[in-house]
Image (cartoon, rainbow, N blue to C red):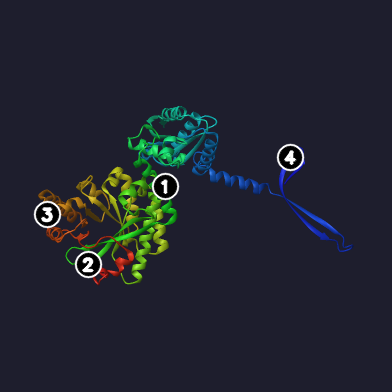
Amino acid sequence: MTLTVVKSLTYPVCVELRLISTAAHGTPGFAVAAFDVSHWREREASLAHALHHDPLTGLENLIALKEAIGAAQDEAELTRTHAGLVLLDIDDYQRINRALGYNAAGDELLRETARRIQHTAGQSERVARVASDECAVLLPPGTTAELAEGLGRRLLTAIAQYRHRGQPTHLSASVGVALYPDQAEKNARNSVQTSLLRMADLALAQAKEAGGNALVFYTLDDNPADAERLKLEADLYEAVRNGEFSLFFQPITKIHTGAVVGVEALMRWNHPVHGLVPPSTFIPLAESIELVNYLGNWVLKAACMQIVQWDAVGIRLDYVSVNVSQQQFRDKRFTAAVKKELALIGIDARRLVFEITESLLMHDPEEATRLLEALTSIGIRFAVDDFGTGYSSLAYLQRFPLSKLKIDRSFVENLITSRNNRAIVSAVVGLAQSLGLELVAEGVETEAQRDLLAELGCDHIQGWLISHALPSDELARSVSVEFAHVA
């Protein structure tokens, strides 16, 4: 209720009404109390604003955008028109941010970019910041493909030139554009329609894959492969909600004694229809729809809990090895998330090994060094996975705080018959020994491969010769005295 004190001066009030009886006459009466709740309302409004707006740019955030998209989609279907969405992501923002000096300069760049996007967008179009360097413009129902694409191209021009402390800086961006509903997709998927945000995100991913500074309009070829991919994406979201993932573990053994010193944790998706979906299928998919950070954090937590469970039954391995994707590694919350899980579950950080790729290290060597040092300082160890397939060089290995190298299975596969592969493995062994790094050969399937690797000086092996990846209970049942070995 509101209370008007004087003309055009109104306060929100909370009124409490109670039935009472007077002591003298016993006649019923009412007691009324009114409380000014202006400050409550102001707090409420402030909280609602904070929940739906980005504090840096003042733009609406992803929560607000999703609500607006839902309403726009409903209206578009009701009116048989199209709503549109333009997603813009600044190319190589981390490099630009470092060049500008991080913090204030980088924040001002984002604020200026937001201002230019707002100025370029129309009055009926809603602008939001949806990620660190990604903004969105929602076009209301009634838009066309030409209008949406035209806006995207004007945005590319609007943000291109930027000056910092008098110095010109050229910005480029990747832009993804989509309309809802998309008739071609509805035909391909038996009228099941992907959300506007999802379609624009797919288009944005294609623009990035094209090298950036590009605009891609979402299209779906009317063929079964595209329809199946979209169906699998939807299934992956369902899998997260339904808890359809599990960890399998593949042992890593000492090559001379066969003692198991550690295991690699490998994620499996038990699809309700297709059965076990291989990581080679769903991990790239998870990366494309930005689920890989969630899955990576789930693996980290599950691996830590498994260490505790095995310890409780006398299976004390030196370490569990966990794969870390480039997206997960670059997430600014990753280091804090690792520390949080270690503290909550209560395990020694030295019993975790993070497997990363050479390409992850070389994408941004300075930033990679900083992140590796932050995590190695608390005890985490790092292994370079699939070593030899990327940027292998002594110079780059020396600059990073690494503990292990894992020889890619492609070199082990033809080790017996290929002189070249033997020479490569021998060189890698010498390199690892000179740098004090432990060496693990992956994909070992035969005794002949194992024996030759031992002869060449390899420390540890992993592969089907020892064991396939097993669920935790099967691995526990197969444990021998050697599995409980502590190196």
Taking the image as drawn, is residue 59 in sight? no
Q: Quadrant of residue 25?
A: bottom right
- Earlier residue among tags 1 and 2: 1
- Earlier residue among tags 3 and 4: 4
- Which residue in the protein does label 4 denote? 9
Mark 3: which amino acid?
Ile
Q: Is residue 455 above or below residue 184?
A: below
Mark 2: which amino acid?
Ala
Q: Is residue 308 above or below residue 287?
A: below
Kindly check if marks 3 and 2 are in contact, taking CB atoms under 8 A apart as contact.
no
Kindly check if marks 1 and 2 are in contact, taking CB atoms under 8 A apart as contact.
no
Q: Is residue 221 above or below residue 13?
A: above
- Choose mark 2 or mark 4, whichever is in front: 2
Q: CA distance from mark 2 to mark 4?
A: 81 Å
- Earlier residue among tags 2 and 4: 4
Residue 451 as seen in the image, left or right of residue 174:
left
- Which residue in the protein does label 2 denote? 259
- Which residue in the protein does label 3 denote? 416
Secondary element type, mark 3: loop
Q: CA distance from mark 1 to mark 2?
A: 43 Å
Q: Nearer the viewer, residue 454 or 230?
A: 230
Residue 330 as seen in the image, left or right of residue 420:
right
Taking the image as drawn, is residue 156 in sight? yes
Instruction: Tell me the residue at 54%/31% (across/down).
Output: 124
Task: Locate residue 240, reporting x and y percent.
Answer: 42, 53
Task: Locate residue 211, reporting x and y percent.
Answer: 32, 35
Task: Locate residue 191, reporting x and y percent.
Answer: 45, 41
Give the total number of marks visible in the rendering.
4
Residue 141 as seen in the image, left or right of residue 35:
left
Instruction: Tell me the residue at 42%/50% (across/down).
Output: 237
How dense is the environment of label 3, judged by Cα within 10 Å: few (below 14), some, or many (20 and up)?
Answer: some
Q: Quadrant of residue 310?
A: bottom left
